[in-house]
Amino acid sequence: MSTRLVNLVIDAARPRVLADFWAALLGWRVAVEEPREVDVRAPETDGWDLDLVFVPVPEPKEGKNRLHLDLASTTPAHQAELVARALELGGRHVDLGQGAVPWVVLADPEGNEFCVLEPRERYAESGAVAAILVDAHAPEPLAEFWARITGWPVQAREGDVLVGLRAPSGRGPWLEFLRNDDVKRVKNRLHLDVAPPAGSDHTTAVAEVVAAGAVDAGGPDLPWRVLRDPEGNEFCVLTPR
């Protein structure tokens, strides 16, 4: 399948404010600012090939997000530095019932949860973001679906609890599916975008993704297609690029 990951999209009440938070925390830059989106982009040396795209929405955040970011650290001192920086920029500690764990659970200024991980060998070459975490009732089949539509193979398994995909380049973040039995009740505030390559046919690409297990999410007529993965997570198939 020809589609590939191109964006991680984050709904925001104040896109520029939230983009500034994440750019400062990650050491990235605001690359695009338009009325309908603000894009934060990593330096090429980081290995992250996606844009963080912040889009305005009127709806407030409800409940815990089903997708979140895990940030990588290289030493305990670096982990503490990242936590302190996040708090200074407007983040806050959150308690999700995690108990005594070696990572730190925080929320950004609009309440989006993220974790600052302790140093882990798996993420030594990931760059600033260790992983995009997706809650899953059944991690293995959901990971298989995303492996098909992104071209990222399965590179890690932890029993029936977690399945991790990694870009074929071996650089940048992991895409991980973590067992969680919570029921999805509202539209996700974070979602992934995939796109076929320039010069290909968008309709054909959408049909291939649907054949892999996606379903139409409905909504207005747009240049791109909004779909749901096998567990109901919204994502977009953008036009060729």
Image (cartoon, helix red, strand yellow):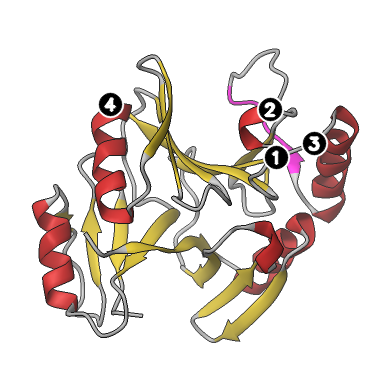
Separation (CA) of disc 3 from disc 1:
7 Å
Can residue 55 be seen?
yes
The residue to which callout 1 is attached is: 72
Stretch of the chain drawn in magenta: 92-96
Looking at this view, is 3 or 60 the one in front? 3
Q: Is residue 172 above or below residue 200?
A: above
Confirm or deny contact between disc 1 and disc 2 (CB under 8 A).
yes
Position of 138 with respect to 76 (left or right) is left
Amino acid type, mark 2: Arg
> Which amino acid type is shown beneath numbered disc 3?
Thr
Front position in the image: 208 or 184: 208
What residue is disc 3 on? 74
Residue 148 image offset from top left, x and y in percent: 25, 48
Q: Position of residue 36 (x, y in %)?
A: 49, 81
Q: Is residue 29 above or below residue 140?
A: below
CA gap between label 1 and label 2 equals 8 Å
Give residue 138's mark: 4
Residue ID for mark 2:
120
From mark 3 to mark 2, how far is it between C-alphas? Answer: 8 Å
